[in-house]
């Protein structure tokens, strides 16, 4: 029996609040990364004062209830006390925040999947400690049709990533089907749908080489972009009941 598909896209207000919350979490994760690599008392004091102001801003903008339960636990931790795994969330915050800024028309287009969002892509749009009303005057949620189009592209990349992982894990396909045939069909669909514009060695192109040859840190980086973009676009299109329930399939 197929899992029921839940389609109830968030309102513009909900997307705005999600972007505001992720902005806070992104800034916090950046501060935590600094302490994790090189603790400095003077920088700690500066950041501590900054996040005290952020806490006041959250209260003034009535944002507290927009954070998920997991996010509230993170924010309640003393500054400098996030563990390495929690600090590494900064990458996912950057990618998902970039997607939300794009959805709110603050960014013109999504960067390629083998590039991802950079700090400069989002840093100027972060509205923390600024007027929420000013931020509202700059944003406009893109039409649902645009969100669905990008979500479908993200799904193609996700399927390519998933196919590669299944092959590495020696997952057995249906009788008479091979990974080579599955990849061929996926590439044809990706080309016809516009998810990719060209191939290398009959595969998705990633930094000038086929997807199948991406490995090591490059593979981890690419995987993070694909997963976070797919999950965030799925959320924007109403595939989950809440942000914390985002999951791959």
Image (spheres, rainbow, N blue to C red):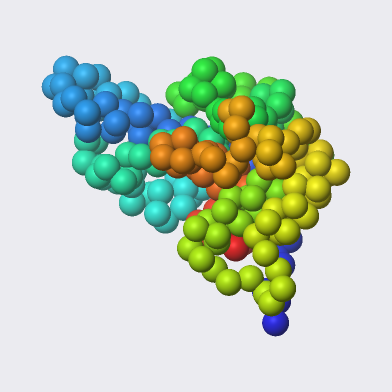
Q: Residue furthest left?
A: 41
Q: Looking at the image, how many numbered discs can be counted on the residues?
A: 0
Residue 203 visible in the current orientation? yes
User: From the viewer's perspective, is 187 left or right of 55?
Assistant: right
Which quadrant would the N terminus be assigned to in this image?
bottom right
The one of 208 and 79 positioned closer to us in this rendering: 208
Which quadrant would the C terminus be assigned to in this image?
bottom right
> Residue 244 location, x and y as percent?
50, 56
Which residue is at 73% across, 36% downward?
Answer: 199
User: Dividing the picture into quarters, in which one does residue 131 lie?
Assistant: top right
> Residue 230 location, x and y as percent?
62, 47
The one of 7 and 130 positioned closer to us in this rendering: 7
User: From the viewer's perspective, is 41 left or right of 242?
Assistant: left
Which residue is at 46% across, 41% downward?
Answer: 215
The one of 249 and 124 positioned closer to us in this rendering: 249
Relative to residue 247, is residue 82 depicted above or below? above
Residue 92 visible in the current orientation? no
> Residue 240 location, x and y as percent?
63, 60
Q: Residue furthest bottom?
A: 1
Which residue is at 58% across, 28% downward?
Answer: 207
User: Dividing the picture into quarters, in which one does residue 13 lie?
Assistant: top right
> Residue 84 location, x and y as percent?
27, 42
Relative to residue 134, is residue 90 depicted above or below? below
Relative to residue 188, is residue 106 depicted above or below? above
Which residue is at 36% across, 34% downward?
Answer: 29
The one of 157 and 130 positioned closer to us in this rendering: 157
């Amino acid at each position: 029996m197929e899992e029921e598909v839940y389609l109830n896209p968030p309102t513009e207000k909900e997307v705005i609040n999600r972007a505001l919350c992720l902005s806070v979490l992104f800034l916090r994760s950046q501060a935590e990364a600094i302490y994790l690599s090189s603790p400095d008392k003077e920088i700690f004091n500066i950041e501590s004062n900054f996040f005290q102001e952020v806490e006041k801003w959250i209260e003034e903008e009535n944002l507290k209830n927009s954070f998920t339960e997991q996010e509230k636990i993170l924010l309640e931790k003393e500054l400098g006390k996030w563990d390495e795994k929690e600090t590494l969330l900064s990458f996912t915050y950057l990618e998902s925040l970039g997607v939300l800024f794009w959805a709110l028309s603050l960014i013109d287009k999504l960067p390629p999947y083998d590039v991802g969002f950079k700090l400069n892509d989002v840093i100027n749009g972060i509205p923390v400690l600024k007027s929420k009303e000013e931020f509202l005057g700059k944003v406009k949620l893109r039409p649902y049709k645009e969100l669905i189009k990008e979500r479908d592209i993200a799904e193609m990349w996700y399927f390519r990533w998933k196919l590669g992982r299944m092959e590495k894990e020696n997952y057995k396909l249906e009788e008479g089907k091979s990974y080579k045939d599955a990849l061929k069909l996926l590439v044809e669909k990706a080309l016809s749908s516009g998810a990719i514009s060209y191939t290398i060695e009959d595969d998705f192109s990633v930094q000038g080489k086929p997807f199948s040859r991406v490995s090591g840190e490059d593979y981890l980086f690419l995987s993070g972009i694909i997963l976070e973009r797919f999950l965030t676009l799925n959320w924007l299109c109403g595939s989950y009941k809440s942000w914390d329930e985002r999951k791959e399939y």
